[in-house]
Amino acid sequence: QVQLVESGGGLVQAGGSLRLSCAGSGRPFSTYTMAWFRQAPGKAREFVAAINWRGGTTDYADSDKGRFTISRDNAKNTVYLQMNSLKPEDTAVYYCAARSSVLTTRVVDQYDYWGQGTQVTVSS
């Protein structure tokens, strides 16, 4: 198993930036494909970005491409989400997720472990 703890959320004005972090513990972090999802009130959890175990493959939701960057540091057991040019519609709880596979996926149910989430609020 792996335990995930997100941090870095907060309140930011539209156009601003935030960097989320997700620290993993337990089984070797480098064996997991990692992803970020988000969930706004009253909406389903949606895919944001994913990165494979070596960091060589990334995938982004179309709405986030060009604004968000996912990266990982396996030596620090941490995955990051750099978010730039934030919009009010980015407001949500952001979750880190891990799956025991070398392949990325956008499907929520295909991730095995989840963090508790961190709130991101973008004011207009």
Image (cartoon, helix red, strand yellow):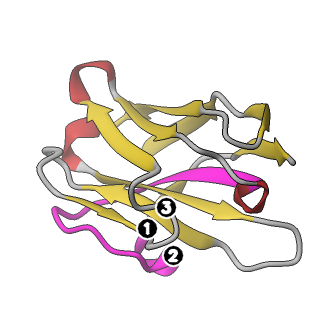
Q: Residue at x 74, y 53 (%)?
A: 93
Range covered by the magenta-colored residues? 91-111
Q: Which of the marked residues, 3 or 1, is nearer the chain's N terminus?
A: 3
Q: Position of residue 29 (x, y in %)?
A: 29, 37
Which disc number belongs to residue 85? none
For disc 2, the neighbor class at 10 Å (few under 14, some 14 to 19, many from 20) is: some
On the question of residue 100 being in view, the answer is yes
Q: Position of residue 40 (x, y in %)?
A: 79, 66
Q: How many marks?
A: 3
Query: SS for tag 2?
Result: helix
Cα–Cα gap, marks 3 and 1:
20 Å
The image shows residue 98, relative to residue 27, as above or below, that is below
**Residue type highlighted by circle 2:** Val
**Residue type highlighted by circle 3:** Asp
The image shows residue 41, relative to residue 91, as above or below, that is below
Image position of 52 (left or right of 90) = left
Cα–Cα gap, marks 3 and 2:
17 Å
Tell me, yes or no, whether the two marked residues, 3 and 2, touch with CB atoms within 8 Å: no
Query: SS for tag 3?
Result: loop
Query: SS for tag 1?
Result: loop
Q: Which residue is mark 3?
A: 64
Q: Position of residue 116 (x, y in %)?
A: 69, 46
The image shows residue 15, relative to residue 104, as above or below, that is above
Q: Residue at x 65, y 51 (%)?
A: 94
Image position of 42 (left or right of 65) = right
Cα–Cα gap, marks 1 and 2:
6 Å
Q: Which residue is mark 2?
A: 108
Q: Which residue is mark 1?
A: 111
